Image: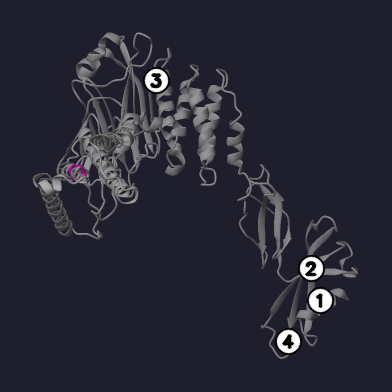
């Protein structure tokens, strides 16, 4: 009767009805009440319509007893359908009624207390994708397990191999987190300190670095330099191993070569590392495709350290297609950025105390050829600048510098860098205000520049005449406030003169830093003298000081000219790069 009443709710009584009912699944929907899912299909044939106008209605019910469902005393049903049992995202989702949200305990732990895995059974009986935002993913769970790993000589290679596999699995942004990256950095750094790393472990480390380049730059930038240093240490150790054989690796985003070369040949002919690209694939030392990047080490480099070399010299070279592991700091990256692959080379030279000898101040430069990539469409650029990576900059975080490198632009647009040291190299470009959609045309920009120069010159003339007038006329010269006015004008004259003469003289780092220091200093001096004038007026009007002694002006001058040195000298002593607002120091607009 209950079944009949449910069916008649949806089908008119005057229709002829054929009903077929069957149990869809023997898996209980509600384990507590042992209810099961049964579907009934009712086919009805209206009297006034032809036989061909068959209409089928589906009524879905829950019955308490699967063996005697027609005699059940109570019946529950849903017109929204049911979602079938399904395994997805490592979770088993039970059969559920349409419109119901299913919650399951997080398999690998919750991100926050009370967090659960959720999935909505939509009306009509279709599953929505699982919501695992509050759950730790399987990949992150594996990273967490690695965080407690103790690296030893016995397990270092297996740890590197397993860690590389987990990094390769971290394809979703939810797994590419700073915490997981911190685990990678710590384990990688600890592993390279173990001398027993085999070539299999080295290959795993290289694969891991290659995969990390696909992670978001804001996630890796704080510690990316440590990853590069760890990899170079790993390559150094493996090159010096007793049973080492030359190693070549090409991945999706990078290429590496570690080798031992004959010292006599290196002294005579130098050494080179060339990477070409064909249909998106990187090739090392072949003629396939277009040359992507190359670096040549002159023979004189090996001559300088020949007294430290054996019959063979170990060296390794690297290429990174993107600069994700070499973030540019201190600039607007949408306008100034690395527009070439990053290429580098190192020669393993041990000093008297077995420490690595840095290769710098070369008599003959290292020659680097780089192809520009990643230039935005419809954009032109200015000031391509060869830069090298300084691992010590920004407190060990690393940053780019142009020290020791010169830039040459070829007719085909490729860049040639000549540098007098060894590290990683790239090309930096500036597209600020240079796109076709630029708001200010070059003509208008020139007009604004001329107006600025004219205003500066008029200001300089006015300030100079003011100083002359204050000192030339006896009436003004004898006033108590005149010395303060004179010092203030002198500070402003120095500030405007340095700005006028030096603001565009950024051909080298030393010149840029000098201009920056002087502008900051004279600005602070001018502000100090303005404050001194305010104090003078307060003493004159409120305190009513009748006479100001010579000692007053001397103390005033010492305070106003010396105190501004403190905030200028301190950052200069800590890190002079902090005084540069743009990393592009050659023909680019200063920010």
Mark 2–mark 3 contact, CB under 8 Å? no
Q: Distance between the residues labelled 4 and 3?
A: 86 Å
Q: Where is residue 413 in the image (x, y as percent from the top left)?
A: 19, 43
Q: How far apart are marks 4 and 1 (CA)?
A: 19 Å
Q: Nearer the viewer, mark 2 or mark 3?
A: 3
Label 4: how many Cα within 10 Å (few below 14, some 14–19, many 20+): some
SS type, badge 4: loop
Which numbered tag is attached to residue 6? 1
Nearer the observer, 265 or 174: 174
Mark 2–mark 1 contact, CB under 8 Å? yes
Quadrant the N terminus occupies: bottom right
Q: Which of marks 4 and 1 is in front?
A: 1
Q: In which quarter of the image is residue 558?
A: top left
SS type, badge 3: helix
Mark sitting earlier along the chain (3/1): 1
Q: Position of residue 430 (x, y in %)?
A: 25, 46
Q: Distance between the residues labelled 2 and 3?
A: 70 Å
Q: Which residue is drawn at 24% across and 41% down?
A: 522
């Amino acid at each position: 009767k209950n079944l009949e009443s449910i069916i008649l709710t949806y089908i008119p009584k005057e229709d002829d009805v054929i009903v077929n009912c069957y149990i869809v699944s023997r898996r209980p929907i509600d384990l507590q009440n042992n209810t099961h899912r049964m579907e009934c299909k009712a086919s009805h044939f209206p009297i006034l319509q032809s036989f061909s106008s068959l209409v089928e209605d589906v009524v879905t019910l829950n019955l308490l007893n699967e063996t005697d469902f027609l005699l059940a005393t109570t019946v529950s049903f849903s017109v929204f359908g049911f979602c079938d049992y399904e395994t997805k995202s490592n979770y088993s989702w039970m059969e559920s009624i349409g419109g119901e949200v299913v919650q399951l305990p997080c398999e690998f732990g919750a991100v926050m207390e009370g967090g659960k895995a959720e999935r909505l059974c939509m009306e009509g009986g279709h599953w929505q994708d699982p919501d695992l935002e509050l759950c730790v993913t399987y990949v992150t769970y594996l990273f967490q397990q690695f965080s407690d790993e103790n690296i030893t000589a016995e397990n270092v290679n297996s740890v590197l191999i397993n860690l590389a596999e987990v990094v390769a699995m971290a394809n979703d942004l939810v797994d590419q987190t700073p915490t997981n990256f911190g685990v990678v950095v710590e384990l990688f750094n600890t592993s390279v300190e173990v001398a027993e790393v085999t070539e299999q472990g080295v290959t795993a480390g290289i694969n891991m670095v290659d995969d990390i380049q696909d992670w978001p730059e804001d996630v890796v930038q704080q510690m990316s330099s440590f990853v590069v240093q760890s990899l170079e240490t790993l390559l150094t150790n493996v090159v010096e191993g007793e049973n080492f054989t030359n190693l070549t690796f090409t991945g999706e985003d990078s290429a590496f070569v570690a080798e031992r070369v004959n010292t006599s040949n290196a002294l005579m002919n130098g050494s080179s590392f060339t990477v070409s690209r064909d249909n998106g694939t990187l090739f090392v030392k072949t003629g396939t495709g277009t040359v992507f990047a190359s670096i040549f080490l002159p023979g004189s480099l090996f001559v300088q350290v020949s007294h430290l070399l054996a019959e063979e010299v170990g060296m390794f070279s690297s290429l990174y297609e993107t600069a994700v592991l070499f973030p540019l700091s201190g600039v607007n990256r949408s306008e100034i950025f690395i527009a070439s692959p990053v290429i580098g080379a190192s020669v393993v030279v041990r000093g008297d105390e077995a420490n690595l000898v840095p290769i710098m101040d070369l008599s003959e430069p290292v020659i680097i050829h780089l192809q520009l990539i990643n230039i935005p469409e419809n954009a032109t650029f200015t000031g391509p600048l060869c830069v090298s990576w300084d691992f010590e900059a920004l407190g060990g975080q690393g940053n780019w510098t142009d020290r020791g490198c010169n830039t040459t632009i070829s007719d085909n647009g490729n860049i040639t860098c000549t540098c007098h040291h060894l590290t990683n190299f790239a090309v930096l470009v500036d597209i600020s205000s240079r796109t076709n959609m630029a708001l200010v045309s070059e003509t208008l920009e020139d007009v604004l520049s001329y107006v600025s120069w004219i205003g500066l010159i008029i200001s300089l003339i006015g300030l100079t005449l003011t100083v002359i007038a204050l000192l030339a006329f006896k009436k003004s010269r004898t006033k108590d406030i005149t010395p303060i006015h004179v010092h203030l004008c002198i500070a402003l004259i120095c500030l405007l003169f340095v700005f006028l003469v030096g603001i565009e003289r950024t051909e080298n780092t030393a010149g840029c830093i000098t201009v920056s220091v002087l502008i900051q200093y004279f600005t602070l001096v001018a502000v100090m003298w303005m404050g001194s004038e305010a104090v003078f007026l307060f003493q004159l009007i409120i305190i009513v000081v009748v006479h100001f002694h010579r000692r007053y002006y001397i103390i005033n001058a010492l305070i106003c000219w010396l105190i501004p040195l403190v905030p200028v000298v301190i950052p200069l002593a800590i890190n002079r790069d902090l005084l540069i607002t743009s990393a592009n120091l050659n023909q680019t607009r200063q920010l």
